[in-house]
Image: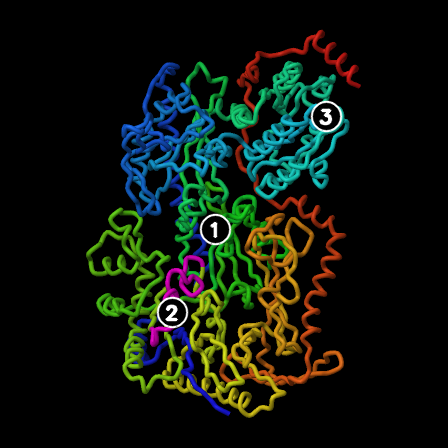
């Protein structure tokens, strides 16, 4: 038997807790200035909250200055319907015609890349104007508004100088234009169209109106066929787009009878969050016309819904009915007399669809006699502007009373930045304030001029809760008054389609209970939504390595409210490493010397020094900023002194590692076979990294290798795993395919045995004594190869041998396909971790052949990462994770994913058992490999169970699918459920000075006897 041998390559990960190789003396030198402090979670969350309140308070002051400036500018501006004013249109700037001359509303507009605005070309000395394609950019209202709002330029610049952390500032006008600072070049879509309309944005709608309960009533009688139905559907969708998570809604369709578009929502309102709005849109597309339109019963049903609104099923503020029809022929006056007069607390807005005007007066009368507004929509192009009118009517009480409520939005994806793939500033929240006309002659009309606002990048806000203070498993998170996540390390707002990243449809309506799922009684969620301050402890099953491996933690939750916002802040500290912080003190000179070592880096996403305040600092890396601050070259930098002190201490204590690794490289005879890379990490985000060979991919341990680096959201996966493993033992780890290098990993033993090319991590928590560590490393490696030699060279052909880790993954095998597959033996504890995936594509299950179940391990109960169960939050059917490629008919919908995980029971040192496979049986033996997380698995190989095990995993899935068909009621219950929420504090639904006669181009209308007679006669003829 011929044997060929190659070098055995390992990646060695060294995590230091107390000392390092060659670092014992260094540690003893500084031992006297070292101390361990207990982390006070209550004080920590209070401090974080105060710093966040201060930051958000600066944004609110900036917005208030903008609102005051805009109102003053309007007060002294006299409207001129013949005004001509050339402004910078963001679509036309720096554009020339065929003769090389600037196009109208264009002109030269200097743009320069700016680090603060994610390297986008901007003009920080000037704002410019964006006008939607469907709005005429020379309209007198637009020109007058743009001219008036020129006064905001100086305020924009002044705000930015006072608070250099400000991002985008803007004014969205009620007439349709959008003034943005700093000015940019606006890029249209592929059709040359700009669909962005500020009046559709959530920050505009929330600031312009108070929360509202809305019932949309749509006519689906026979006369609404064709284009009319298309326009009606578009009108409904546009109304839905104006609603937010503080609003409640339902949709009723009527013809001969009344029906709910979603029967599950019968008789109630549901929260107008993104999930429900999108669900309604799908149902609206299925509407068909039939029969005769009888609006009376539909109006009665709508009033009954609104009359029965409770704290949990409505906003208890504005109430409105949106009637979409091509005509109203019945005697409907008695409905309003019974349900809405004389208080008229429910406003009725009417939308007359189509070119036919026969029943226009009837539709007008309904709106004008119920404090609403009438509009006529004859084409699809008319929908947008006409729908927006209702917002101006609802804003009247607030405008007349001059109540400048500041609002904060839920998390949202900034569309401008998203198109640039600017990942660091994707998720935003906005603070906004309405702008009113203060002119006395129009006071009773309650004229809303627009809304001013600014954005806050949530990543920048979360930097105020630094990772090093929270420990290896700790984290901070924010939720809204509705319990939705604003920021959380487990929130994944994007999904990949092909090579593109796209926002998931419901990324901003993920509830806290769907992420902190161990809080089964929702005590944590309830307390935070109510704005309380307190603590809670939970036993948590969490996962690392993207759901493949489970950990069991004891978490302490601390939470409090952020004053003057609808947000609540929570932090999590884990018992053990999260309870204490290890600090030391060394001189700047000594620490700086070791900090400049070539093998050292610090976490690039952490804030050691604030580089975003002074424009001159924005191009500095964090390490460069730290060095310049410590050397006195940039004394004005604002730095985290506690973090700097800890980083300097870690640099000094770990400095001997560089000399040790260098000696290894120079003395190849002392190099252990297969040690390829050595690196370590500390709680301060410091890393030392040495490539002993160059076969690893260059992306390893770089900014693109997020799983293995210190990021704003988490510690490296190898750091987190090692932290929960007993000190003094080795942790061997096969990284995921997307983060590991491919190289010659093992010996090719004979022509009949093929070794797979894989790379391993070896993780170790170091005690102080370096000699003990070296012995452990050599003994552990030699022991593994000793077991392998027994298996591979001395075992008969009917025996298979494997080395598996404590989570059941195969690390070493004779068969290439076995490595990294998942096994489950009787010595493993079977548990489940959950992950709210936000969205998955529902498709057909893969065939049994596509499941990665290996023949050699077929006697064991096998699960692989490609075979996972998941349940949809809004669909009762269980499904399998499908391909990332979109197929026709695929449905994107949110889902909860349950990951089967296996954890070895360490008290079982050795065990054996027999598993029956049809007519034969297999025996296996499992034995722990000392001082490691590995197990040697020996299996009898003369009994084939592959067919049985290929069929078995699908059986429970099919049973679950069968039961799910009959479980539609669960879906309905989940959709109807209204979790505890905190209503916004202010409500502006009524003002006695409101001019309700302004109801859509007509003065107050009374239903004349002759018109009433015509209606009845026509109704009789039709029936």
Specify which label sits upstream in the sequence, 3 or 1.
Answer: 3
Q: Residue 473, relative to residue 62: is it above or below?
A: below
Q: Residue 567, relative to residue 331: is it above or below?
A: below
Q: Foreground mark, 1 or 2?
A: 1
**Most common SS among magenta residues:** loop
| Residue 754 percent coordinates (x, y) | 51, 81
Q: Which residue is mark 1?
A: 501
Which residues are the magenta region?
A: 691-713
Whether residue 65 appears in this view of the structure is no
- Where disc 1 sits, the SS reads strand
Assign the C terminus to one quadrant of the image. top right
Q: Residue at x 49, y 48 (%)?
A: 502
Q: Dot 1: few (<14), some (14–19), or many (≥20) neighbours within 10 Å?
A: some
Q: Which mark is residue 222?
A: 3
Label total for image: 3
Q: CA distance from mark 1 to mark 2?
A: 30 Å
Q: Which residue is mark 2?
A: 681
| Residue 405 percent coordinates (x, y) | 47, 32
Considering depth in this image, is 80 or 327 the residue closer to the camera?
A: 327
Q: Residue 733, relative to residue 954: is it above or below?
A: below
Q: Which mark is residue 421?
A: none
Q: Dot 2: few (<14), some (14–19), or many (≥20) neighbours within 10 Å?
A: many
Considering depth in this image, is 865 or 942 the residue closer to the camera?
A: 942
């Amino acid at each position: 038997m011929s044997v060929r041998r190659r070098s055995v390559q390992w990646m060695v990960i060294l995590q230091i807790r107390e000392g390092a190789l060659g670092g014992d003396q260094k540690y003893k030198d500084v031992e006297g200035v070292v101390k361990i402090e207990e982390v006070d979670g209550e004080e920590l969350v209070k401090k974080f909250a105060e710093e966040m309140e201060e930051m958000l308070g600066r944004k609110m002051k900036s917005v208030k200055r903008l609102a005051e400036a805009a109102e003053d500018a309007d007060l002294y501006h006299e409207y001129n319907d013949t005004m001509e004013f050339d402004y910078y249109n963001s679509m036309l700037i720096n554009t020339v015609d065929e003769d090389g001359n600037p196009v109208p509303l264009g002109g030269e507009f200097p743009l320069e890349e700016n680090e603060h605005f994610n390297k986008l070309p901007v003009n920080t000395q000037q704002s410019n104007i964006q006008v939607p394609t469907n709005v005429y950019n020379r309209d007198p209202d637009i020109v007058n508004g743009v001219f008036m709002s020129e006064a905001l330029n100086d305020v924009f610049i002044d705000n930015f100088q006072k608070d250099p952390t400000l991002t985008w500032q803007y004014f969205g006008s009620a007439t349709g234009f959008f003034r943005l600072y700093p000015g940019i070049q606006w890029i249209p879509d592929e059709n040359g169209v700009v669909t962005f309309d500020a009046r559709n944005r959530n920050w505009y709608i929330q600031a312009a109106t108070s929360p509202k309960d809305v019932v949309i009533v749509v006519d689906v009688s026979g006369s609404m066929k064709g284009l009319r139905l298309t326009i009606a559907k578009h009108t409904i969708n546009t109304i839905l787009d104006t609603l937010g998570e503080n609003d409640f809604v339902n949709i009723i369709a009527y013809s001969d009878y009344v029906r709910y578009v979603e029967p599950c929502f019968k008789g109630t309102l549901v929260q107008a969050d993104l999930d429900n709005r999108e669900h309604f849109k799908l149902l609206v597309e299925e509407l068909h016309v039939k029969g005769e339109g009888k609006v009376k019963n539909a109006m009665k049903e709508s009033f009954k819904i609104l009359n029965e609104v409770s704290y949990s099923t409505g906003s208890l503020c504005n109430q409105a009915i949106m009637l979409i029809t091509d005509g109203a022929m019945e005697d409907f006056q008695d409905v309003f007399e019974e349900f809405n007069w004389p208080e008229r607390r429910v406003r009725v807005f009417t939308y007359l669809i189509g070119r036919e005007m026969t029943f226009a007066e009837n539709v007008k009368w309904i709106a004008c006699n119920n404090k609403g507004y009438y509009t006529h929509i004859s084409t699809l192009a008319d929908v947008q502007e006409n729908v927006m009118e209702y917002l101006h009517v609802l804003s009247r009480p607030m405008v007349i009373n001059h109540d400048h409520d500041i609002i904060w939005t839920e998390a949202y994806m900034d569309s401008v930045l998203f198109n640039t793939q600017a990942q660091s500033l994707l998720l935003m929240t906005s603070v906004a304030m309405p702008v009113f006309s203060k002119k006395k002659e129009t006071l009773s009309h309650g004229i809303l001029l627009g809304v001013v606002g600014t954005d806050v990048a949530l990543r920048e806000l979360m930097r105020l809760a630094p990772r090093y203070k929270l420990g290896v498993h700790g984290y901070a998170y924010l939720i809204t008054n509705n319990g939705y996540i604003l920021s959380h390390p487990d929130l994944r707002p994007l999904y990949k389609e092909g090579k593109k990243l796209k926002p998931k449809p419901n990324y901003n309506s993920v509830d806290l209970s769907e992420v902190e799922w161990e809080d089964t009684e929702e005590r944590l969620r309830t307390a935070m939504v109510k704005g309380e301050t307190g603590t809670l402890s939970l036993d948590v099953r969490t996962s690392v390595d993207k759901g493949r491996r489970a950990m069991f933690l004891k978490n302490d939750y601390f939470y409090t409210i952020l004053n003057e916002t609808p947000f609540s802040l929570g932090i999590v500290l884990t018992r053990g490493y999260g309870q204490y912080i290890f600090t030391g003190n060394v001189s700047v000179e000594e620490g700086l010397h070791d900090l400049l070592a070539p093998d050292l880096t610090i976490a690039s996403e952490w804030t050691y020094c604030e580089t975003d305040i002074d424009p001159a600092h924005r191009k500095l890396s964090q390490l460069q900023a730290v060095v310049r601050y410590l050397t006195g070259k940039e004394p004005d930098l604002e730095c985290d002194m506690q973090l700097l002190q800890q980083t300097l201490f870690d640099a000094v204590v770990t400095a001997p590692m560089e000399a040790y690794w260098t000696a290894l490289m120079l003395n190849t005879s002392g190099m252990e076979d297969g040690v390829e890379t050595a690196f370590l990490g500390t709680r301060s985000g410091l890393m030392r990294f040495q490539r002993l060979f160059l076969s690893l991919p260059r992306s390893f341990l770089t900014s693109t290798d997020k799983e293995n680096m210190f990021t704003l959201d988490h510690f490296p996966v190898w750091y987190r795993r090692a932290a929960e493993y007993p000190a003094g033992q080795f942790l061997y780890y096969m990284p995921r395919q997307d983060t590991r290098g491919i190289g010659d990993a093992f010996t090719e033993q004979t022509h009949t045995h093929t070794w797979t090319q894989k790379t391993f991590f070896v993780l170790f928590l170091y005690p102080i004594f370096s000699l003990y560590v070296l012995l452990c490393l050599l003994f552990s490696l030699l022991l593994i190869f000793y077991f392998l030699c027994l298996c591979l060279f001395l075992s008969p052909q009917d025996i298979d041998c494997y080395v598996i880790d404590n989570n059941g993954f195969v690390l070493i095998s004779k068969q290439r396909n076995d490595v990294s597959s998942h096994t489950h033996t009787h010595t493993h504890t079977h548990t489940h971790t959950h992950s709210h995936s936000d969205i998955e594509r529902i498709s057909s299950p893969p065939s049994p052949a596509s499941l990665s179940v290996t023949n050699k391990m077929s006697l064991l109960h096998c699960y692989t990462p490609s075979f996972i169960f998941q349940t949809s939050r809004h669909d009762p059917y269980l499904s399998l994770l499908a391909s990332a490629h979109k197929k026709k008919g695929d449905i994107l919908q949110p889902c909860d994913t349950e990951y089967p995980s296996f954890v070895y029971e360490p008290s079982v040192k050795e065990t054996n058992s027999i598993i029956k496979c049809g007519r034969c049986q297999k025996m296996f033996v499992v034995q722990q490999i000392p001082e490691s997380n590995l197990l040697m698995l020996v299996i009898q190989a003369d009994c084939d169970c592959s067919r049985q095990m290929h069929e078995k995993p699908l059986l429970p899935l099919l049973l679950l699918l069968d039961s799910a068909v009959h479980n539609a009621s669960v879906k309905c219950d989940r959709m109807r459920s209204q979790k505890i929420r905190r209503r916004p504090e202010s409500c502006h639904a009524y003002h006695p000075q409101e001019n309700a006669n302004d109801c859509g181009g007509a003065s107050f209308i009374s239903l004349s006897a002759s018109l009433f007679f015509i209606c009845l006669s026509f109704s009789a003829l039709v029936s």
